[in-house]
Structure formats: C-alpha cells, structure tokens
Image (cartoon, helix red, strand yellow):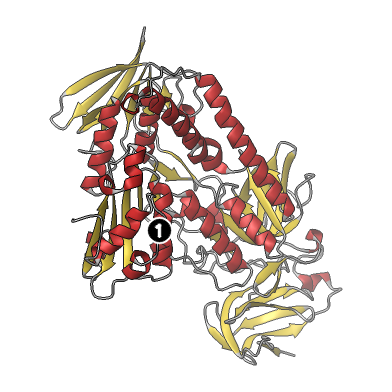
Amino acid sequence: MSTAFAVPDLGDGATEGRLVALEVAAGETVAEGTLLAEVETDKSIVEVTAPETMAIEACDAAEGEDVEVGETLFTYEAADPDDPSESGDGEGGEPAEPPEPTEDGPSEPDDDSADAVGGASQLTGGASERTVRPVGEGTPADVPSPGSVEGVPEQTDVLIIGAGPGGYVAAIRAGQLGLDVTLVEDDAVGGTCLNYGCIPSKALIHGADIAYEAANAEHLGVSADPTVDIDQLTGWKDDVVDQLTGGVEQLCHAQGVTVVDGVAEFVNNRRATITTDDGETAIDFGNAIVATGSRPIEIPDFPFDSEYVLDSRDALALDERPDSLVVIGAGYIGMELSTVFEKLGTDVTVVEMFDDVLSGYDDDISRLVRERAAEFGIDFRFGEMAASWEETDDGIVVHTEDEDGDRHSLEAEKVFVVGGREPVTDTANLQAAGIELDDDGFVKTDAQGRTTCERIFAIGDVVGEPMLAHKASREGEVAAEAIAGEPSVLDYQAMPAVVFTDPEVATVGMSENDARDDGYYPVVGRMPLASNGRALTLGDTEGFVRIVADRRTELILGAQIVGPNASELIAEVALAIEMDARLSDIAETVHTHPTLSEAVMEAAANARGEAIHTAD
C-alpha cells in the first residue's frame, strides 16, 4: 500500500523551509536510516532520514522548492529489509538507476552519509554501510574504499583541499566550532603566501631596506658600506617561514584538525580520493572547502623550466644575487622584487607592455612608485612586450617588441617573469562534484563562499580577484561559520590591498571615481606626508593620505595611502568603513604626536575643511 512521506517537524518552531536536496528518486529502495532530504530553515539545515526500509514510488517535490511541515515529499511502499531483491544493491537484485543530475550539479548519493546538527553536516555510521555514487553511474571500480591509508580518516565533517591562508584558517575556525576537520595539502602548510610569496618576500624586502638605508644615509651624517650575504639572508628568510609554518601546524593540531600530506580529488559531492606517499584512499565528507589557490601564468616562449627563466618562487629562493636581471611585468610582484634586487646591487630592467607601473592604480600613485624606483636605479621599458629569449656565453638575451613592431635586445643573467596569476582549478576534479566556473575560469560562489554544489564551498585565489591572503583567510572563516550554521557573510567593501614597494601603497574601499560611478557625491581630503612631522624625522616624505567620503553624509567610502608604513595606516580607514564611520569620527579622534597616523586624521579633517597642518 502506498504511503505519503511528509515533511516532519523541523524544530525551533519552524513550519516551513527550502528543499535544498532530495536524496531519493522514483524506483529506488532505501534502507532504514538513509538520508532522504535536506530542508533549510532560517536557523538550520534539517536532514530527514528514512524511518524504515522504503521503495520509493514517486516524488512530489523538487529541489529548490519551498515546503511546509506536513507537505508530501514522496510516496513509497514499505519494503522488506531482508529481501535483497528489493534493496537495489544486494546480491540477488539489479542496482537501482542513479538519480538524474540537478541544476546544482551532481545528485546526492542514495545512501546515508551525513546528519546535520545546527546546520553543520556531521557524518554518521561506518563507511562500509554506505554506498556513494557519482552522477549517472555507479562508483567507479578504481575508486578505493575509505580507510585504506593510515592517517586518513574514513569520514569527516569538513574536507578542506589546500592549506594556504584560506584553507588552514578555515580548518582552525571549523575546529573551534566543534566540527571534525580534515585538511589536505600537497605541498606545504601555509600555501604560496607563507612559503613562497608574501612572507619570504617581505623578509627579503626588510633585509634589502636595511642595506640600502645604511649605504644611503650620508645626509644624516651616517656613512657605511654594507655587504650582503645573500645566502645568509635567504637562510634567515627560510627560518622565518619555518617558524610560521610550524606555528600553523600546531594551531591546526590544537583544534583537532587532521592534516594530510597528499592530493585530494572529488569523486562526487560526498566523496573524494586522497593520494599520499603511502597510497590512495577515499574519504566521505559532509561539507568541503576548495582552497587550491593560484599559480604564476606562463607567457609564450618563457616557460618556467630553465635555470634562466624565474617565477616569483624561484626569485625568492636564489642563493646568489644576479648581477643583472630583466623583469617582465610591472605589477605589484614585479615592482616589489625589482626594488629588492636593485637595492641589493643587481642592475634591474623592467619590461612592461603598459605605459606605467601598477596598472589599475591612480596616476599619482603609479608616478610616485615609478619615480622612486628610477631613483634606486631601475630602468623601465614601457610599451614593450617580451617576445623571446636565448642563452649566451654570458647569460641570456631577452628580445622585446614595441608597439611599432621594432625589436630590442636586453642582456642579463636571469629573467624574472611576473605575468600575473591564474586559479588552480584542474587538480581536484571539481566537475565531478558539480562545481561550476565563471567566464574568467574562477569558481562561482555566493557571499558565504558556497559553490554551485550546496555542500561545497570555495575560498581564496580560486574564486577570483583580489588575490589577497587576508581576503582568503576571512573567506575561510566565513565558509567555516556558514557550514556550522552561523549567519556569516563577507563584505568586500572594507577589504584593504597593499603593495610593498618603496614607497608602500595601500588602498581600501572606493576611489573618488568609484564613488562617483556608484552615485555618491564624493568629497576628498588629502594630507601630504611632506607636512607630517614623523615623516620628516624618518627622512621619507614622498607620499600622501587621501580619504574619500560622501559629501552629504560624510560617510567614509575609501582611502589611498602612499608612503612609509602605508600597510599599517590603512587599517584605521578599513575599520572606519566597516563601522560606517563618518569623517568626524577620524578627524576628532586624538592621534599620538608625532606619528604617521596623524596624516590620516588630517586627511579626514581636510575633507571637512578643518585641517590644521595642510592648506590643500
């Protein structure tokens, strides 16, 4: 006899919700305890399981629909749990046809693999009691069973692929929220930023700055002729990296995170394979977070497979300083490392197809960075593209081509290529989990980081610009909190960005043009560092603080800062934007004297026509 299966009590007083997943299809027979459906209320995601063995006859609701308590989801007949002919996967019966794909990607497995409490998916039961299938076919025969490699659990609440600044932060936050977490990394914990990017580059920048300042302080009455041991400087940089990576691993372990050295690939949206040095196994997960990051883009005829052609990782690992270097690209990475090597004594030539450095920044910002770089001795070749290179007895020759088609040659020991970065989307078999990419090749996500597969999130560089470590970290926190059922979202308006050139460049929020395009009536306050007492005592007065606000409400909309410690100063304005602060909130806050931060206060006052130390 047919029986209607209705939406059960959803708890917390909820009487309705959205059917985010229907785990069964007509013709299937499911065992007692099998996950049948997931209903999302305004407080949690409720997972509905089978009270008995059921033979599904017809489905009356579809994923994405709003459903009420008591509304029929499907009809079924009670089945004999001991009859293999009815179970759909016993020895005596034919396997049930897998459900069709949904608009959100692969359909859910037909067997119980998760049980959510308070919105967080938590796996229950042994892996041997479940069958997880990809869309349109049974689980491939070559997919190993869970638990076949020591150190890799059979199941986990949250599987995180990638242990960079997004992945490891997501892991720690999920652990703090009481979830069982497995973090998989195929290279080094900390990712590109910690091991090969932002941390080692800032360490080298610091060393180069010390050497340069010591050698160029005659105007202060200080004379020195420093020598730099590149091997020792690189070793110190590596020690800093080792200390931080060790700290990250300890933090993960403190929160009960299982860290696995291996490669993870999705089988479907419930299971992934993990390959380690000890073999291959599978793991079932309730939710997953993709944090696979980005990698340098290779430009034609300059592959990163030569001792002469370097990417950013290679450049930061050199144990000898090249006497000459061609840098292709005047973006933030190119300009940061060009400045480092020039200060260390390398002759640097920068080739850039655009007409200035830091494309995308305001002209007055780019000009200050370019002029200071030229003072250091960096040569620029604007309007030229790198065409090819060849090895010579003394090093290499880089051939470039300008807008008129004329070719030029540049001799150097090495060439450093920084043509940008691209998302890593080809290592985790995202398609098998129903994860879609946008037109630019990035993973599509919502404000919580959720992908086109409801239970899988993505964070960091793989989801798009800006490719910033602190953005990835905050996205990781938000994704972990969303998985745990918390109402967490990320507002990108207060997301600062920094270029660690000399002078430093820091921005947050809107520029004046951005504000005008968004319908505001902007007012701009500016404070030149030449009028700041602390900048004068540092002997570093090139730069400014500029604050953008709405003229009518004085709501702070953005800021651009160029000068020493701009990376630190920008945080005050980022906080102001996050708090919907007004110009008066900064202008009337007493700032310590003498400090660079006074320039932020003066810029806010200047926008109100009340600045004391500038007549701009």
Identify whether 269 is placed above or below 18: above
Residue sitting at x 43%, y 70%: 579
In percent of width and height, residue 375 lies at 26, 28
The residue closer to the viewer here, 415 or 509, is: 509
Q: Amino acid at mark 1?
A: His
The residue closer to the viewer here, 404 or 579, is: 579
Residue sitting at x 57%, y 84%: 17
Query: Can you say which quadrant of the picture contains the C terminus?
Result: bottom left
In percent of width and height, residue 412 lies at 33, 17
Q: Label 1: few (<14), some or many (≥20) within 10 Å? A: some
Query: Can you say which quadrant of the picture contains the N terminus?
Result: bottom right
Residue sitting at x 50%, y 64%: 452
Q: Residue furthest right?
A: 82
The residue closer to the viewer here, 151 or 268, is: 151
Residue linked to disc 1: 591
Q: Residue furthest top?
A: 393
Residue sitting at x 22%, y 28%: 381
Left or right position of 129 against 401: right
The residue closer to the viewer here, 116 or 258, is: 258
